[in-house]
Image (cartoon, grey):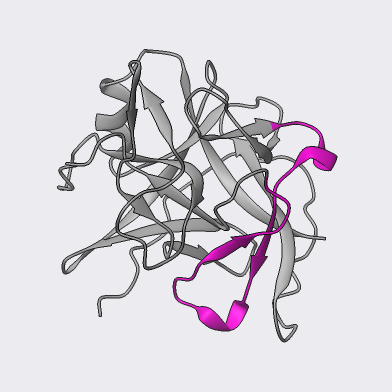
Amino acid sequence: MPAPAAAPSFSGTAGPLPAPAFQQSGFLIGRIRCIPSDGLPSTYISRYLDAHNGLLLRTQDPMHSLQVRWNPSSLPTSTLGTVNCRSSYQFLGGVTRNNNPQFLPGCSESLSITTTTGPTSSTRAHSRIYKGRPISGLPFANIWNIIHDGTVVATLRVDDTSYALTSMITLKSNSVSLALCPRAYLASRSPGDRVEVRLVFEPI
C-alpha cells in the first residue's frame, strides 16, 4: 500500500493552539478548527448540516462545533467518528459532486466535507441536492491523518495513487472542501469565494 502523500504547505497562523495529547491510549475526542491562510477569523466545522445540500457548515462558536472521535493507533489514515452531529450517519468524510469523478493529477475534482455511513460504504453519503436534483456522490471516510502538531490531513487513495488533499472553505455556502489540485480547483470556481485553510484537531 503506498504511503500517504505529504501534507500541503500552509503559512496561515492563528495564535497558540492546544497541545495535542496523542500519547494517550484509546480514543481522543476533539473539534476541528479551520485556520484561513489570508488572516480571516478561524472557525470550526459545525455539528449542523446545511438543509439544502447536506454538507457540514462552519461556526465561530465552539459550543456548536462538531465533536469527532479519533484513535491515534489507527495511523497512517483512519476514520473520524462523529459524536454530536445532527445526522444519522456517524463518520466524518467527503463526498464528490457527482457519481463519476475523474481523479487525475492536475484535475479540479474535490470532496465536500459531510457525514458518511462508514469507511466501507460504496453507495451514498448524506442526501444532497445539486441544481435542484437529489444526488449522492461518492463518499470517502477512511481518509484522515492527524500529524504531530494537530494538523488534519486528508489523503485520498485511488488505485495505486495517493493524493494529499488541500482544505478550502467556501465563503458563500459556509462549507469546507478538499481539493486534489488547488490551482485547478480555484480556476474552475467563482473567483474570490474560496480560501485555503489549515484544519487542526483540538482535543477537548
Where is residue 48? Give x, y as percent: 67, 36
Above or below, comparing residue 144 to residue 113 in the picture: below
Above or below, comparing residue 76 to residue 25 in the picture: above
Q: How many marks?
A: 0
Q: Which residue is pictured at 66% across the width and 41% down the height?
A: 13
Q: Which residues are magenta?
A: 59-85
Q: Most extreme residue toward the bottom, as rendered?
A: 25
147 relative to 30 in the view: left or right = left
Location of the C terminus by quadrant is: bottom right
Where is residue 87? Give x, y as percent: 61, 46
Q: Which residue is pictured at 50% across the width and 33% down the height?
A: 54
Above or below, comparing residue 114 to residue 52 in the picture: below
32 relative to 11 in the view: left or right = right
Magenta-drawn stretch contains 68: yes
Q: Which residue is pictured at 33% across the width and 36% down the height?
A: 182
Q: Which residue is pictured at 68% across the width and 39% down the height?
A: 46
Location of the N terminus by quadrant is: bottom left
